Image (spheres, helix red, strand yellow):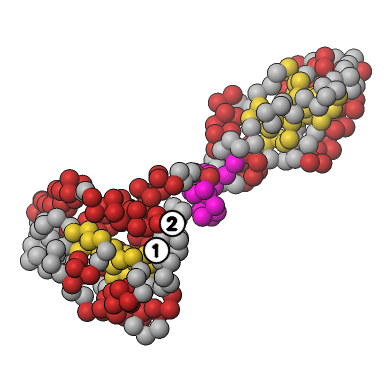
């Protein structure tokens, strides 16, 4: 049985081997990489990623990463392609084929199909003179590096380089397209990442749910509005509809007196309250509320007109805490 110290040494050797391979891959990027990016950018269709065995698993991940970052892509199994799935590939598409040896027989039909119908083909392989490299419009040849497997048989270093090269393609395309966090949210509406990319406008109370009163309104009227809207606050607006102040439970306590109900809203409100725009990330709005120990923020457009209220409970329900 391998001792714990030996096991750690083996693990570190594997990681060191693969890290050095990634360094050499980064240094090797040149013209063909730029040609591959251009080929994908110019393809009016999708990116079809294919590979067999371990390369197939990597291909699936590359396709998923591209699809989630604004580059429509999906995986096609090369063996299934030979039995009808070639119909998924159109002349508008670009194909990215992965094969460490470049001689994977299952890729034969899909390679021939791209050549027959002049579909752009990018090959990712470790051998310059292989069938895949020779047939491809752009060959991305991985630099020579030993597999982390001591027998040099199990795909380890080679699949790590393929995976990293796929990430490099996806992120390069992402940045060249100007893909934003808002775009990312469209493809990730669920899960923690989708929650973190929610905008204030996605969570705020607006329309009839907006508690607004005029500056001359009596506090008796203000209390009725605050109770009806159940947000613990009311916005005080000018005659032209701009937000002048906010009334909260705290303001009521600070001005508690026998004359409170007959006082005007403008006399009790907190003027120039903290506000946020509707396109702000909800997570940032929550940070501001936590930082200032407040429970709600009015949401205003650029002209100062309120369009909503964001309450801390809205953020908590959305899982932003």
Residue receiving disc 1: 47
Q: Please identify the quadrant where the N terminus is shown.
A: bottom left
- 236 versus 65 height, above or below: above
Residue 134 vertical placement versus 266 (above, below): below
Identify the mark nearer the N-term, 1 or 2: 1
Q: Residue at x 72, y 36 (%)?
A: 308
Left or right position of 277 against 88: right
Q: Position of residue 269 (x, y in %)?
A: 78, 19
Give SS at disc 1: strand
Q: Main secondary structure of the magenta part?
A: helix
In reply to whether residue 181 is colored magenta, the answer given is no
Question: Furthest residue to the bottom?
Answer: 83
Query: Local crowd at mark 2 within 10 Å, few (<14), some, or many (≥20)?
Result: many
Percent position of residue 23, x then y: 17, 46
Measuring from the top left, give residue 231's x and y in whole percent: 75, 36
Q: Which residues are magenta?
A: 183-199
Q: Residue 184 colored magenta?
A: yes
- How far apart, in angstroms, are the residues tagged by discs 1 and 2? 7 Å
Residue 251 visible: no
Numbered disc total: 2
Q: Which mark is residue 197?
A: none
Asked which secondary structure carries label 2, the reply is loop
Badge 1: how crowded within 10 Å, few (<14), some, or many (20+)? many
Residue at image mark 2: 71
Which quadrant would residue 202 be assigned to in this image?
top right
Query: Do the residues bearing badges 1 and 2 touch, measured as CB atoms within 8 Å?
Result: yes
Quarter holding residue 77: bottom left
């Amino acid at each position: 049985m391998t001792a714990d110290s030996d096991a750690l040494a083996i693990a570190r050797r594997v990681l060191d081997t693969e890290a050095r391979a990634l360094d050499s891959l980064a240094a090797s990027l040149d013209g063909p990489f730029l040609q591959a990016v251009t080929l994908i950018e110019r393809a009016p269709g999708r990116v079809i990623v294919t590979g067999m065995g371990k390369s197939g698993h990597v291909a699936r991940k590359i396709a998923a990463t591209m699809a989630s970052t604004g580059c429509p892509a999906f995986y096609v199994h090369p063996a299934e392609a030979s039995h009808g799935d070639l119909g998924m590939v159109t002349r508008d598409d670009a194909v990215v084929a992965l094969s460490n040896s470049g001689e994977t027989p299952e890729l034969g039909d899909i390679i021939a199909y791209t050549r027959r119908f002049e579909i752009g083909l990018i090959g990712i392989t470790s051998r310059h003179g292989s069938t895949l490299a020779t047939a491809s419009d752009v060959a991305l040849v991985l630099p020579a590096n030993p597999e982390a497997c001591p027998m040099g048989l199990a795909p380890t270093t080679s699949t790590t380089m393929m995976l990293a090269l796929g990430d490099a393609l996806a992120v390069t395309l992402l940045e060249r397209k100007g893909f934003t966090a808002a775009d990312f949210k469209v493809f990730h509406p669920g899960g923690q990442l989708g929650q973190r990319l929610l905008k204030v406008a996605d969570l705020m109370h607006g329309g009839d749910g907006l508690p607004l009163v005029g500056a001359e309104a009596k506090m008796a009227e203000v209390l009725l509005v605050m109770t009806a809207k159940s947000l613990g606050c009311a916005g005080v607006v000018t005659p032209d509809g701009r937000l002048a102040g906010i009334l909260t439970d705290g303001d009521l306590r600070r001005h508690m007196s026998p004359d409170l109900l007959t006082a005007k809203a403008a006399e009790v409100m907190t003027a120039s309250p903290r506000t946020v725009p509707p396109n702000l990330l909800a997570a940032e709005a929550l940070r501001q509320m936590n930082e200032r120990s407040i429970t709600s923020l009015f949401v205003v457009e650029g002209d100062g007109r309120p369009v909503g209220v964001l309450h801390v409970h809205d953020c908590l329900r959305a899982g932003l805490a």
